[in-house]
Amino acid sequence: MGSLSPAISSKLLLPTTTSDRTSFHALIRSSFPCRGERPNMIGVFKRTHCVASAEKKSKSAIDFSDPEWKTKFEEDFEKRFNIPHMRDFFPDAVSYPSTFCLRMRTPVSEEFAQGYPSDEEWHGYINNNDRVLLKVIRYSSLTSAGAECIDPDCTWVEQWIHRAGPREKIYFKPEDVKAAIITCGGLCPGLNDVIRQIVITLEIYGVKKIVGIPFGYRGFGNELAEIPLSRKVVQNVHLSGGSLLGVSRGGPNVSEIVDSMKERGINMLFVLGGNGTHAGANAIHNELIKRGLKVAVVGVPKTIDNDILLMDKTFGFDTAVEEAQRAINSAYIEAHSAYRGVGIVKLMGRSSGFIAMQAALASGQIDICLIPEVPFELHGPHGVLKHLKYLLETKGSAVICVAEGAGQNFVEKTNAKDASGNVVLGDIGVHIQQEIKKYFKEIGDPADVKYIDPTYMIRACRANASDGILCTVLGQNAVHGAFAGYSGITVGICNTHYVYLPIPQVISYPRTVDPNSRMWHRCLTSTGQPDFI
Ligand SMILES: Nc1ncnc2c1ncn2[C@@H]1O[C@H](COP(=O)(O)OP(=O)(O)O)[C@@H](O)[C@H]1O
Ligand SMILES: O=P(O)(O)OC[C@H]1O[C@](O)(COP(=O)(O)O)[C@@H](O)[C@@H]1O
Ligand SMILES: [Mg+2]
Protein backbone atom coordinates (compact mmCIF):
# COMPACT_ATOMS: atom_id res chain seq x y z
CA MET A 1 0.00 0.00 0.00
CA GLY A 2 1.41 3.40 -0.93
CA SER A 3 1.06 6.49 1.20
CA LEU A 4 -0.54 9.77 0.20
CA SER A 5 1.71 12.21 -1.55
CA PRO A 6 2.58 15.01 0.94
CA ALA A 7 1.73 17.63 -1.67
CA ILE A 8 -1.76 16.20 -2.01
CA SER A 9 -2.37 15.53 1.65
CA SER A 10 -1.39 19.00 2.81
CA LYS A 11 -4.12 20.85 0.94
CA LEU A 12 -7.68 20.22 -0.14
CA LEU A 13 -10.02 22.18 -2.35
CA LEU A 14 -13.22 23.21 -0.66
CA PRO A 15 -15.94 24.08 -3.17
CA THR A 16 -18.54 26.62 -2.18
CA THR A 17 -20.68 27.22 -5.26
CA THR A 18 -22.38 24.74 -7.58
CA SER A 19 -19.99 25.45 -10.43
CA ASP A 20 -17.07 25.21 -8.00
CA ARG A 21 -18.40 21.86 -6.93
CA THR A 22 -18.70 20.60 -10.49
CA SER A 23 -15.10 21.50 -11.19
CA PHE A 24 -14.14 20.15 -7.77
CA HIS A 25 -15.53 16.72 -8.62
CA ALA A 26 -13.99 16.77 -12.08
CA LEU A 27 -10.70 17.77 -10.50
CA ILE A 28 -10.94 15.11 -7.85
CA ARG A 29 -11.63 12.46 -10.45
CA SER A 30 -8.80 13.56 -12.71
CA SER A 31 -6.36 14.13 -9.85
CA PHE A 32 -6.99 10.82 -8.15
CA PRO A 33 -7.02 8.18 -10.85
CA CYS A 34 -6.78 5.31 -8.37
CA ARG A 35 -10.22 4.50 -7.04
CA GLY A 36 -9.20 3.91 -3.44
CA GLU A 37 -7.25 7.10 -2.94
CA ARG A 38 -9.32 10.01 -4.11
CA PRO A 39 -11.16 12.20 -1.65
CA ASN A 40 -14.87 11.58 -2.03
CA MET A 41 -17.44 14.30 -2.66
CA ILE A 42 -17.21 15.65 0.84
CA GLY A 43 -13.46 15.89 0.49
CA VAL A 44 -12.39 12.82 2.38
CA PHE A 45 -9.16 10.93 2.02
CA LYS A 46 -9.29 7.19 1.67
CA ARG A 47 -6.52 4.64 1.97
CA THR A 48 -4.92 3.97 -1.38
CA HIS A 49 -3.16 1.31 -3.38
CA CYS A 50 -1.30 3.81 -5.52
CA VAL A 51 -0.06 7.38 -5.45
CA ALA A 52 -1.82 10.17 -7.37
CA SER A 53 -0.06 12.70 -9.54
CA ALA A 54 0.51 15.80 -7.43
CA GLU A 55 0.85 18.20 -10.31
CA LYS A 56 -2.83 17.94 -11.19
CA LYS A 57 -3.79 19.25 -7.77
CA SER A 58 -5.77 22.49 -7.58
CA LYS A 59 -4.11 25.71 -6.50
CA SER A 60 -7.22 26.75 -4.64
CA ALA A 61 -7.02 24.48 -1.61
CA ILE A 62 -7.30 24.40 2.14
CA ASP A 63 -4.07 24.48 4.04
CA PHE A 64 -4.03 21.89 6.80
CA SER A 65 -1.29 23.83 8.53
CA ASP A 66 -3.86 26.63 9.06
CA PRO A 67 -4.99 26.19 12.70
CA GLU A 68 -8.50 27.22 11.57
CA TRP A 69 -8.83 24.60 8.82
CA LYS A 70 -11.18 22.37 10.79
CA THR A 71 -13.57 25.20 11.65
CA LYS A 72 -13.46 26.35 8.04
CA PHE A 73 -14.19 22.84 6.82
CA GLU A 74 -17.15 22.47 9.17
CA GLU A 75 -18.54 25.84 8.14
CA ASP A 76 -18.13 24.98 4.48
CA PHE A 77 -19.80 21.61 5.05
CA GLU A 78 -22.75 23.32 6.74
CA LYS A 79 -23.07 25.60 3.71
CA ARG A 80 -22.89 22.79 1.17
CA PHE A 81 -25.44 20.70 3.03
CA ASN A 82 -27.80 23.58 3.58
CA ILE A 83 -31.22 22.62 2.23
CA PRO A 84 -32.77 25.24 -0.06
CA HIS A 85 -35.86 26.88 1.41
CA MET A 86 -38.64 29.06 -0.02
CA ARG A 87 -37.50 31.94 2.18
CA ASP A 88 -34.09 31.89 0.41
CA PHE A 89 -35.79 32.72 -2.91
CA PHE A 90 -39.00 34.40 -1.82
CA PRO A 91 -38.25 36.56 1.24
CA ASP A 92 -41.93 37.41 1.56
CA ALA A 93 -42.93 33.73 1.78
CA VAL A 94 -45.59 33.39 4.48
CA SER A 95 -45.71 30.54 6.96
CA TYR A 96 -48.76 28.98 8.61
CA PRO A 97 -49.20 26.71 11.62
CA SER A 98 -48.93 23.11 10.43
CA THR A 99 -52.06 21.17 9.57
CA PHE A 100 -50.22 17.95 10.24
CA CYS A 101 -51.11 17.01 13.75
CA LEU A 102 -50.24 13.71 15.36
CA ARG A 103 -53.08 14.02 17.86
CA MET A 104 -55.70 15.25 15.46
CA ARG A 105 -55.13 13.51 12.20
CA THR A 106 -57.71 15.32 10.12
CA PRO A 107 -58.29 19.02 9.68
CA VAL A 108 -60.98 20.40 12.00
CA SER A 109 -63.30 21.17 9.16
CA GLU A 110 -63.52 20.32 5.50
CA GLU A 111 -63.04 23.90 4.43
CA PHE A 112 -60.54 24.94 7.17
CA ALA A 113 -63.16 27.52 8.19
CA GLN A 114 -62.10 27.27 11.81
CA GLY A 115 -58.42 27.60 11.04
CA TYR A 116 -55.78 24.94 11.40
CA PRO A 117 -55.67 22.42 14.23
CA SER A 118 -52.33 23.63 15.50
CA ASP A 119 -52.95 24.49 19.10
CA GLU A 120 -52.36 21.06 20.59
CA GLU A 121 -49.58 21.04 23.15
CA TRP A 122 -47.49 18.35 21.54
CA HIS A 123 -47.32 17.50 17.88
CA GLY A 124 -44.04 15.64 17.46
CA TYR A 125 -42.56 18.30 15.24
CA ILE A 126 -38.94 18.42 14.19
CA ASN A 127 -37.00 21.54 15.07
CA ASN A 128 -35.42 23.14 12.01
CA ASN A 129 -32.08 23.10 13.79
CA ASP A 130 -32.09 19.35 14.46
CA ARG A 131 -29.16 17.61 12.79
CA VAL A 132 -27.93 14.06 12.14
CA LEU A 133 -24.27 13.14 12.20
CA LEU A 134 -23.18 11.96 8.74
CA LYS A 135 -20.02 10.12 9.79
CA VAL A 136 -20.05 8.17 13.00
CA ILE A 137 -16.73 6.32 13.02
CA ARG A 138 -13.70 8.07 14.43
CA TYR A 139 -10.80 6.50 12.52
CA SER A 140 -7.46 6.71 14.23
CA SER A 141 -5.44 6.24 11.07
CA LEU A 142 -5.73 6.04 7.31
CA THR A 143 -4.52 2.46 7.66
CA SER A 144 -7.80 1.47 9.35
CA ALA A 145 -9.88 -0.58 6.93
CA GLY A 146 -12.29 1.63 5.01
CA ALA A 147 -10.93 4.77 6.70
CA GLU A 148 -12.39 8.05 5.47
CA CYS A 149 -10.50 11.00 6.86
CA ILE A 150 -10.59 14.69 6.08
CA ASP A 151 -6.88 15.19 6.66
CA PRO A 152 -3.91 12.81 6.78
CA ASP A 153 -4.03 12.75 10.61
CA CYS A 154 -7.66 11.65 10.63
CA THR A 155 -8.73 14.59 12.78
CA TRP A 156 -12.26 14.22 14.12
CA VAL A 157 -14.48 16.58 12.15
CA GLU A 158 -18.20 16.84 12.70
CA GLN A 159 -20.38 16.68 9.60
CA TRP A 160 -24.01 17.44 10.39
CA ILE A 161 -26.94 17.08 8.03
CA HIS A 162 -30.58 18.12 8.35
CA ARG A 163 -33.04 15.89 10.16
CA ALA A 164 -36.21 15.02 8.23
CA GLY A 165 -39.74 15.24 9.56
CA PRO A 166 -42.79 17.46 10.09
CA ARG A 167 -42.21 21.10 11.05
CA GLU A 168 -44.38 23.39 13.13
CA LYS A 169 -44.64 25.96 10.36
CA ILE A 170 -45.72 25.16 6.82
CA TYR A 171 -45.30 27.29 3.71
CA PHE A 172 -48.28 26.07 1.72
CA LYS A 173 -51.96 26.25 2.56
CA PRO A 174 -53.26 22.72 1.85
CA GLU A 175 -56.28 24.06 0.00
CA ASP A 176 -53.95 25.90 -2.40
CA VAL A 177 -51.80 22.86 -3.15
CA LYS A 178 -51.86 20.85 -6.34
CA ALA A 179 -49.38 18.02 -5.76
CA ALA A 180 -47.97 15.80 -8.51
CA ILE A 181 -46.06 12.54 -8.20
CA ILE A 182 -43.81 11.13 -10.89
CA THR A 183 -41.76 7.93 -11.21
CA CYS A 184 -38.80 7.93 -13.63
CA GLY A 185 -36.03 5.62 -14.86
CA GLY A 186 -36.24 1.84 -14.39
CA LEU A 187 -38.59 0.01 -12.04
CA CYS A 188 -37.68 -0.63 -8.44
CA PRO A 189 -39.54 -2.55 -5.71
CA GLY A 190 -41.38 -0.11 -3.45
CA LEU A 191 -42.37 2.58 -5.95
CA ASN A 192 -46.04 1.97 -5.22
CA ASP A 193 -45.39 2.03 -1.48
CA VAL A 194 -43.81 5.48 -1.75
CA ILE A 195 -46.60 6.80 -4.00
CA ARG A 196 -49.14 5.49 -1.51
CA GLN A 197 -47.51 7.15 1.49
CA ILE A 198 -47.12 10.47 -0.30
CA VAL A 199 -50.81 10.49 -1.17
CA ILE A 200 -51.91 9.46 2.33
CA THR A 201 -49.68 12.04 4.03
CA LEU A 202 -50.78 14.82 1.65
CA GLU A 203 -54.38 14.03 2.50
CA ILE A 204 -53.60 14.19 6.22
CA TYR A 205 -52.26 17.71 5.69
CA GLY A 206 -55.55 18.46 3.96
CA VAL A 207 -54.53 18.41 0.29
CA LYS A 208 -57.36 17.60 -2.11
CA LYS A 209 -55.68 17.97 -5.49
CA ILE A 210 -53.22 15.13 -5.97
CA VAL A 211 -52.27 13.74 -9.38
CA GLY A 212 -49.85 11.24 -10.85
CA ILE A 213 -47.90 12.16 -13.98
CA PRO A 214 -47.86 9.05 -16.21
CA PHE A 215 -44.66 7.46 -17.52
CA GLY A 216 -42.02 9.62 -15.89
CA TYR A 217 -40.93 12.96 -17.35
CA ARG A 218 -42.52 11.91 -20.66
CA GLY A 219 -45.89 12.45 -18.96
CA PHE A 220 -45.29 16.18 -19.05
CA GLY A 221 -45.80 15.92 -22.80
CA ASN A 222 -49.29 17.18 -23.51
CA GLU A 223 -50.89 14.04 -24.85
CA LEU A 224 -50.78 12.09 -21.57
CA ALA A 225 -53.56 12.71 -19.06
CA GLU A 226 -52.88 13.13 -15.33
CA ILE A 227 -53.97 10.31 -13.01
CA PRO A 228 -56.14 11.54 -10.12
CA LEU A 229 -54.88 10.11 -6.82
CA SER A 230 -56.52 9.70 -3.42
CA ARG A 231 -56.23 7.36 -0.44
CA LYS A 232 -58.95 5.25 -2.04
CA VAL A 233 -57.01 4.91 -5.31
CA VAL A 234 -53.71 4.00 -3.65
CA GLN A 235 -55.03 1.91 -0.76
CA ASN A 236 -53.76 -1.44 -2.07
CA VAL A 237 -51.18 -0.43 -4.67
CA HIS A 238 -48.26 -1.53 -2.50
CA LEU A 239 -49.45 -5.12 -2.87
CA SER A 240 -48.06 -5.21 -6.39
CA GLY A 241 -44.70 -4.41 -7.90
CA GLY A 242 -44.04 -1.86 -10.64
CA SER A 243 -45.36 1.67 -10.60
CA LEU A 244 -49.03 2.61 -10.66
CA LEU A 245 -47.95 5.64 -12.69
CA GLY A 246 -45.62 3.88 -15.13
CA VAL A 247 -41.97 4.77 -15.74
CA SER A 248 -39.84 5.87 -18.68
CA ARG A 249 -36.47 7.18 -19.72
CA GLY A 250 -35.98 10.36 -21.77
CA GLY A 251 -38.76 12.93 -22.24
CA PRO A 252 -39.22 16.69 -22.67
CA ASN A 253 -36.52 19.18 -21.73
CA VAL A 254 -36.55 21.03 -18.42
CA SER A 255 -38.07 24.20 -19.83
CA GLU A 256 -40.95 22.25 -21.41
CA ILE A 257 -41.51 20.38 -18.13
CA VAL A 258 -41.73 23.65 -16.20
CA ASP A 259 -44.09 25.11 -18.84
CA SER A 260 -46.29 22.07 -18.38
CA MET A 261 -46.18 22.31 -14.57
CA LYS A 262 -47.18 25.95 -14.73
CA GLU A 263 -50.04 25.21 -17.09
CA ARG A 264 -51.29 22.43 -14.81
CA GLY A 265 -50.95 24.58 -11.68
CA ILE A 266 -48.64 22.14 -9.91
CA ASN A 267 -46.95 23.65 -6.86
CA MET A 268 -45.61 20.49 -5.22
CA LEU A 269 -43.70 17.90 -7.22
CA PHE A 270 -42.55 14.58 -5.78
CA VAL A 271 -39.97 12.94 -7.99
CA LEU A 272 -39.13 9.27 -7.53
CA GLY A 273 -36.01 8.24 -9.41
CA GLY A 274 -32.28 7.69 -9.48
CA ASN A 275 -29.29 9.85 -10.33
CA GLY A 276 -30.66 10.95 -13.71
CA THR A 277 -34.10 11.72 -12.35
CA HIS A 278 -32.61 13.76 -9.52
CA ALA A 279 -30.43 15.71 -11.95
CA GLY A 280 -33.68 16.49 -13.75
CA ALA A 281 -35.47 17.38 -10.49
CA ASN A 282 -32.68 19.77 -9.51
CA ALA A 283 -32.77 21.41 -12.93
CA ILE A 284 -36.56 21.76 -12.64
CA HIS A 285 -36.15 23.32 -9.17
CA ASN A 286 -33.60 25.83 -10.53
CA GLU A 287 -35.79 26.71 -13.51
CA LEU A 288 -38.82 27.25 -11.26
CA ILE A 289 -36.80 29.61 -9.05
CA LYS A 290 -35.53 31.42 -12.13
CA ARG A 291 -39.11 31.97 -13.23
CA GLY A 292 -40.17 33.10 -9.75
CA LEU A 293 -42.55 30.18 -9.27
CA LYS A 294 -43.12 29.07 -5.69
CA VAL A 295 -43.04 25.30 -6.14
CA ALA A 296 -41.57 22.63 -3.86
CA VAL A 297 -39.61 19.91 -5.68
CA VAL A 298 -38.72 16.96 -3.46
CA GLY A 299 -36.99 13.75 -4.56
CA VAL A 300 -37.20 10.22 -3.22
CA PRO A 301 -34.13 8.25 -4.36
CA LYS A 302 -35.08 5.13 -6.28
CA THR A 303 -32.47 2.72 -7.53
CA ILE A 304 -31.99 -0.97 -6.98
CA ASP A 305 -28.35 -0.38 -7.88
CA ASN A 306 -28.05 1.47 -4.53
CA ASP A 307 -25.78 3.97 -6.26
CA ILE A 308 -26.88 7.17 -4.50
CA LEU A 309 -24.25 8.82 -2.31
CA LEU A 310 -24.33 9.27 1.45
CA MET A 311 -27.30 7.02 2.26
CA ASP A 312 -27.33 3.75 4.18
CA LYS A 313 -29.33 2.30 1.30
CA THR A 314 -32.11 3.16 -1.11
CA PHE A 315 -35.54 1.53 -1.05
CA GLY A 316 -35.99 -1.64 -3.07
CA PHE A 317 -32.37 -2.66 -2.71
CA ASP A 318 -32.99 -5.20 0.07
CA THR A 319 -35.88 -6.69 -1.90
CA ALA A 320 -33.70 -6.99 -5.01
CA VAL A 321 -30.99 -8.76 -3.01
CA GLU A 322 -33.59 -11.08 -1.53
CA GLU A 323 -35.11 -11.83 -4.93
CA ALA A 324 -31.65 -12.51 -6.35
CA GLN A 325 -31.34 -15.35 -3.82
CA ARG A 326 -33.84 -17.37 -5.79
CA ALA A 327 -31.77 -17.15 -8.97
CA ILE A 328 -28.54 -17.88 -7.10
CA ASN A 329 -30.07 -20.85 -5.36
CA SER A 330 -31.30 -22.24 -8.68
CA ALA A 331 -27.86 -21.75 -10.20
CA TYR A 332 -26.33 -23.51 -7.20
CA ILE A 333 -28.71 -26.46 -7.42
CA GLU A 334 -28.14 -26.80 -11.18
CA ALA A 335 -24.37 -26.58 -10.79
CA HIS A 336 -24.27 -28.84 -7.75
CA SER A 337 -26.41 -31.50 -9.40
CA ALA A 338 -24.44 -31.57 -12.64
CA TYR A 339 -21.17 -33.34 -13.34
CA ARG A 340 -18.62 -30.50 -13.14
CA GLY A 341 -21.41 -27.93 -13.13
CA VAL A 342 -20.90 -24.18 -13.42
CA GLY A 343 -23.78 -21.82 -12.58
CA ILE A 344 -23.66 -18.18 -13.69
CA VAL A 345 -26.05 -15.50 -12.46
CA LYS A 346 -26.03 -11.99 -13.92
CA LEU A 347 -27.45 -9.28 -11.68
CA MET A 348 -28.14 -5.59 -12.25
CA GLY A 349 -25.61 -2.93 -11.38
CA ARG A 350 -24.60 -0.55 -14.12
CA SER A 351 -21.57 0.93 -12.38
CA SER A 352 -22.07 -0.27 -8.82
CA GLY A 353 -21.77 -3.86 -7.69
CA PHE A 354 -23.82 -3.59 -4.50
CA ILE A 355 -26.53 -6.06 -5.54
CA ALA A 356 -23.99 -8.69 -6.66
CA MET A 357 -21.88 -8.22 -3.53
CA GLN A 358 -24.78 -8.35 -1.08
CA ALA A 359 -26.51 -11.18 -2.92
CA ALA A 360 -23.27 -13.19 -2.82
CA LEU A 361 -22.90 -12.47 0.89
CA ALA A 362 -26.51 -13.34 1.67
CA SER A 363 -26.54 -16.59 -0.27
CA GLY A 364 -23.29 -18.14 0.87
CA GLN A 365 -23.48 -20.11 -2.39
CA ILE A 366 -21.24 -17.95 -4.55
CA ASP A 367 -17.63 -18.92 -5.33
CA ILE A 368 -16.81 -15.98 -7.58
CA CYS A 369 -18.33 -12.51 -7.39
CA LEU A 370 -17.43 -10.05 -10.15
CA ILE A 371 -18.31 -6.36 -9.86
CA PRO A 372 -17.58 -3.26 -11.98
CA GLU A 373 -15.38 -1.70 -9.28
CA VAL A 374 -12.86 -4.55 -9.20
CA PRO A 375 -10.93 -5.34 -12.40
CA PHE A 376 -10.31 -8.97 -13.27
CA GLU A 377 -8.73 -11.18 -15.93
CA LEU A 378 -10.61 -14.10 -17.44
CA HIS A 379 -7.60 -15.84 -18.95
CA GLY A 380 -4.02 -16.27 -17.73
CA PRO A 381 -2.48 -17.79 -14.59
CA HIS A 382 -4.51 -15.59 -12.22
CA GLY A 383 -7.67 -15.42 -14.30
CA VAL A 384 -11.21 -16.46 -13.42
CA LEU A 385 -11.05 -19.53 -15.71
CA LYS A 386 -7.99 -20.98 -13.98
CA HIS A 387 -9.72 -20.62 -10.61
CA LEU A 388 -12.85 -22.19 -12.02
CA LYS A 389 -10.82 -25.20 -13.14
CA TYR A 390 -9.42 -25.47 -9.62
CA LEU A 391 -12.93 -25.26 -8.13
CA LEU A 392 -14.25 -28.00 -10.41
CA GLU A 393 -11.30 -30.20 -9.48
CA THR A 394 -11.62 -29.60 -5.74
CA LYS A 395 -15.33 -28.91 -5.12
CA GLY A 396 -16.86 -30.46 -8.23
CA SER A 397 -18.99 -27.40 -9.04
CA ALA A 398 -18.94 -23.60 -8.86
CA VAL A 399 -21.30 -20.63 -8.95
CA ILE A 400 -20.43 -17.20 -10.35
CA CYS A 401 -22.34 -14.01 -9.69
CA VAL A 402 -21.56 -11.16 -12.07
CA ALA A 403 -22.85 -7.58 -12.05
CA GLU A 404 -23.96 -6.32 -15.46
CA GLY A 405 -21.38 -3.52 -15.47
CA ALA A 406 -18.43 -5.79 -14.61
CA GLY A 407 -15.73 -6.65 -17.15
CA GLN A 408 -16.99 -4.24 -19.80
CA ASN A 409 -13.45 -4.24 -21.22
CA PHE A 410 -14.11 -7.79 -22.46
CA VAL A 411 -17.29 -7.08 -24.40
CA GLU A 412 -17.78 -5.20 -27.60
CA LYS A 413 -18.67 -1.52 -27.15
CA THR A 414 -21.71 -0.44 -29.14
CA ASN A 415 -21.53 3.27 -28.26
CA ALA A 416 -25.31 3.06 -28.04
CA LYS A 417 -27.17 5.08 -25.41
CA ASP A 418 -30.69 4.74 -24.03
CA ALA A 419 -33.25 7.56 -24.14
CA SER A 420 -31.82 9.01 -20.90
CA GLY A 421 -28.28 9.03 -22.24
CA ASN A 422 -27.11 5.99 -20.24
CA VAL A 423 -24.55 3.86 -22.06
CA VAL A 424 -26.00 0.53 -23.24
CA LEU A 425 -23.75 -2.14 -21.77
CA GLY A 426 -22.40 -5.26 -23.45
CA ASP A 427 -23.67 -8.57 -22.06
CA ILE A 428 -20.92 -9.75 -19.73
CA GLY A 429 -23.00 -12.71 -18.56
CA VAL A 430 -23.30 -14.20 -22.03
CA HIS A 431 -19.63 -13.45 -22.70
CA ILE A 432 -18.44 -15.25 -19.55
CA GLN A 433 -20.68 -18.20 -20.35
CA GLN A 434 -19.17 -18.50 -23.84
CA GLU A 435 -15.60 -18.10 -22.59
CA ILE A 436 -16.07 -20.79 -19.94
CA LYS A 437 -17.50 -23.24 -22.47
CA LYS A 438 -14.67 -22.49 -24.90
CA TYR A 439 -11.97 -22.81 -22.25
CA PHE A 440 -13.05 -26.20 -20.94
CA LYS A 441 -13.53 -27.53 -24.46
CA GLU A 442 -10.02 -26.40 -25.35
CA ILE A 443 -8.39 -28.02 -22.32
CA GLY A 444 -10.41 -31.17 -22.95
CA ASP A 445 -12.18 -31.20 -19.57
CA PRO A 446 -15.96 -31.24 -19.40
CA ALA A 447 -17.95 -28.43 -17.79
CA ASP A 448 -21.72 -28.21 -17.67
CA VAL A 449 -22.50 -24.48 -17.82
CA LYS A 450 -25.93 -23.07 -16.85
CA TYR A 451 -26.61 -19.35 -17.24
CA ILE A 452 -29.41 -17.51 -15.41
CA ASP A 453 -30.31 -13.88 -16.13
CA PRO A 454 -32.97 -12.77 -13.61
CA THR A 455 -32.40 -9.08 -14.42
CA TYR A 456 -35.98 -7.82 -14.59
CA MET A 457 -37.34 -10.36 -12.10
CA ILE A 458 -35.45 -8.78 -9.22
CA ARG A 459 -36.84 -5.32 -9.80
CA ALA A 460 -40.41 -6.01 -10.92
CA CYS A 461 -41.47 -7.61 -7.63
CA ARG A 462 -43.22 -5.92 -4.71
CA ALA A 463 -41.19 -4.58 -1.81
CA ASN A 464 -40.39 -6.81 1.14
CA ALA A 465 -41.35 -5.80 4.69
CA SER A 466 -38.20 -3.82 5.53
CA ASP A 467 -38.31 -1.94 2.23
CA GLY A 468 -42.02 -1.33 2.81
CA ILE A 469 -41.17 0.44 6.05
CA LEU A 470 -38.36 2.43 4.44
CA CYS A 471 -40.73 3.53 1.63
CA THR A 472 -43.32 4.57 4.19
CA VAL A 473 -40.92 6.78 6.12
CA LEU A 474 -39.34 8.28 3.01
CA GLY A 475 -42.72 9.00 1.41
CA GLN A 476 -44.02 10.71 4.56
CA ASN A 477 -40.83 12.73 4.97
CA ALA A 478 -40.97 13.88 1.35
CA VAL A 479 -44.36 15.48 2.06
CA HIS A 480 -43.16 16.99 5.35
CA GLY A 481 -40.19 18.51 3.52
CA ALA A 482 -42.36 20.07 0.82
CA PHE A 483 -44.82 21.54 3.33
CA ALA A 484 -41.93 22.86 5.42
CA GLY A 485 -40.99 24.92 2.36
CA TYR A 486 -37.90 23.06 1.22
CA SER A 487 -37.21 22.49 -2.48
CA GLY A 488 -34.40 20.94 -4.49
CA ILE A 489 -33.96 18.38 -1.72
CA THR A 490 -34.15 14.64 -1.43
CA VAL A 491 -34.91 12.31 1.46
CA GLY A 492 -32.73 9.52 2.76
CA ILE A 493 -31.68 7.31 5.61
CA CYS A 494 -28.33 8.05 7.16
CA ASN A 495 -26.93 6.06 10.07
CA THR A 496 -30.49 4.79 10.63
CA HIS A 497 -31.85 8.35 10.92
CA TYR A 498 -33.95 10.11 8.30
CA VAL A 499 -32.53 13.19 6.66
CA TYR A 500 -32.99 15.87 4.01
CA LEU A 501 -30.11 16.47 1.63
CA PRO A 502 -29.59 19.04 -1.12
CA ILE A 503 -29.87 17.14 -4.42
CA PRO A 504 -26.47 18.12 -5.90
CA GLN A 505 -24.69 16.51 -2.95
CA VAL A 506 -26.11 13.06 -3.58
CA ILE A 507 -25.72 12.86 -7.35
CA SER A 508 -22.21 14.19 -8.04
CA TYR A 509 -21.29 10.71 -9.17
CA PRO A 510 -22.69 7.20 -8.66
CA ARG A 511 -21.90 5.60 -5.33
CA THR A 512 -19.77 2.50 -5.83
CA VAL A 513 -18.45 -0.41 -3.79
CA ASP A 514 -15.15 0.55 -2.17
CA PRO A 515 -12.75 -2.35 -2.86
CA ASN A 516 -10.97 -1.38 0.38
CA SER A 517 -14.16 -1.54 2.42
CA ARG A 518 -14.83 -4.11 5.10
CA MET A 519 -17.91 -5.25 3.20
CA TRP A 520 -16.01 -6.17 0.05
CA HIS A 521 -13.39 -7.89 2.21
CA ARG A 522 -16.20 -9.84 3.90
CA CYS A 523 -17.49 -10.86 0.48
CA LEU A 524 -14.02 -12.10 -0.51
CA THR A 525 -13.75 -13.98 2.79
CA SER A 526 -17.12 -15.57 2.13
CA THR A 527 -16.49 -16.62 -1.49
CA GLY A 528 -12.84 -17.51 -0.93
CA GLN A 529 -11.97 -16.05 -4.33
CA PRO A 530 -8.46 -14.76 -5.05
CA ASP A 531 -7.55 -11.54 -6.91
CA PHE A 532 -8.08 -12.23 -10.59
CA ILE A 533 -5.21 -10.08 -11.84
N1 LIG B 1 -28.67 15.29 -16.36
C1 LIG B 1 -30.00 15.24 -16.51
N2 LIG B 1 -30.74 16.37 -16.52
C2 LIG B 1 -32.08 16.32 -16.67
N3 LIG B 1 -32.78 15.18 -16.80
C3 LIG B 1 -32.11 14.01 -16.79
C4 LIG B 1 -30.68 13.98 -16.65
N4 LIG B 1 -30.29 12.68 -16.69
C5 LIG B 1 -31.41 11.96 -16.86
N5 LIG B 1 -32.50 12.74 -16.91
C6 LIG B 1 -33.88 12.30 -17.06
O1 LIG B 1 -34.25 11.59 -15.89
C7 LIG B 1 -35.06 10.48 -16.21
C8 LIG B 1 -34.50 9.22 -15.60
O2 LIG B 1 -33.11 9.08 -15.88
P1 LIG B 1 -32.42 7.64 -15.94
O3 LIG B 1 -30.95 7.85 -15.96
O4 LIG B 1 -33.00 6.84 -17.04
O5 LIG B 1 -32.88 6.91 -14.62
P2 LIG B 1 -32.48 7.12 -13.10
O6 LIG B 1 -33.13 8.35 -12.63
O7 LIG B 1 -32.99 5.91 -12.45
O8 LIG B 1 -30.99 7.24 -13.07
C9 LIG B 1 -35.13 10.41 -17.71
O9 LIG B 1 -36.42 10.87 -18.10
C10 LIG B 1 -34.03 11.31 -18.20
O10 LIG B 1 -34.36 11.95 -19.40
O1 LIG C 1 -33.55 -2.06 -19.26
P1 LIG C 1 -33.67 -0.77 -18.54
O2 LIG C 1 -35.07 -0.42 -18.19
O3 LIG C 1 -32.96 0.35 -19.22
O4 LIG C 1 -32.99 -0.96 -17.13
C1 LIG C 1 -31.69 -1.45 -16.95
C2 LIG C 1 -31.02 -0.69 -15.85
O5 LIG C 1 -31.83 -0.55 -14.72
C3 LIG C 1 -31.01 -0.54 -13.55
O6 LIG C 1 -31.34 -1.63 -12.76
C4 LIG C 1 -31.28 0.65 -12.72
O7 LIG C 1 -31.15 1.77 -13.47
P2 LIG C 1 -31.86 3.12 -13.05
O8 LIG C 1 -31.47 3.38 -11.61
O9 LIG C 1 -31.31 4.12 -14.00
O10 LIG C 1 -33.32 2.92 -13.17
C5 LIG C 1 -29.58 -0.69 -14.05
O11 LIG C 1 -28.81 -1.51 -13.24
C6 LIG C 1 -29.79 -1.33 -15.39
O12 LIG C 1 -28.73 -1.10 -16.27
MG1 LIG D 1 -29.49 6.45 -14.05
Image (cartoon, rainbow, N blue to C red):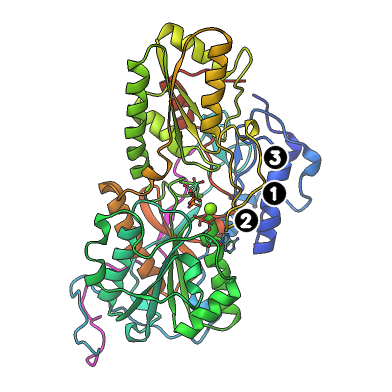
**Is 370 left or right of 245, judged from the image as shown?**
right
Which residue was labeled with disc 1?
Answer: 66
> Considering the numbered disc 1 on the image, is that residue within a helix, a strand or a loop?
loop
Quadrant the C terminus occupies: top right
Considering only order in the chain, which callout, 1 or 2, is on the residue closer to the N terminus? 1
Asked if labels 1 and 2 touch by Cβ distance under 8 angstroms, the answer is yes
Q: In this rendering, which labeled residue sits more in front, label 2 or label 1?
A: 2
The magenta stretch spans residue 205:
no
Considering only order in the chain, which callout, 2 or 3, is on the residue closer to the N terminus? 3
User: What's the amino acid at mark 1?
Assistant: Asp
Which residue was labeled with disc 3?
Answer: 32
> Considering the numbered disc 3 on the image, is that residue within a helix, a strand or a loop?
loop
> Considering the numbered disc 2 on the image, is that residue within a helix, a strand or a loop?
helix
The vertical placement of 22 against 126, above or below, is above
User: What's the amino acid at mark 3?
Assistant: Phe
Residue 473 position within the rendered picture, expressed as x and y whole percent measured from the top left? 31, 58
Number of marks in the image?
A: 3
**Is 398 left or right of 372, judged from the image as shown?**
left
- Residue at 47% from the left image edge and 78% from the top image edge: 295
| Distance Cα–Cα, label 1 vs label 3 | 24 Å
| Distance Cα–Cα, label 2 vs label 1 | 10 Å
Characterize the magenta stretch by its predominant secondary structure: loop
User: What's the amino acid at mark 2?
Assistant: Lys
Q: Which mark is residue 72?
A: 2
Residue 263 visible in the picture: yes
Magenta span: 112-138
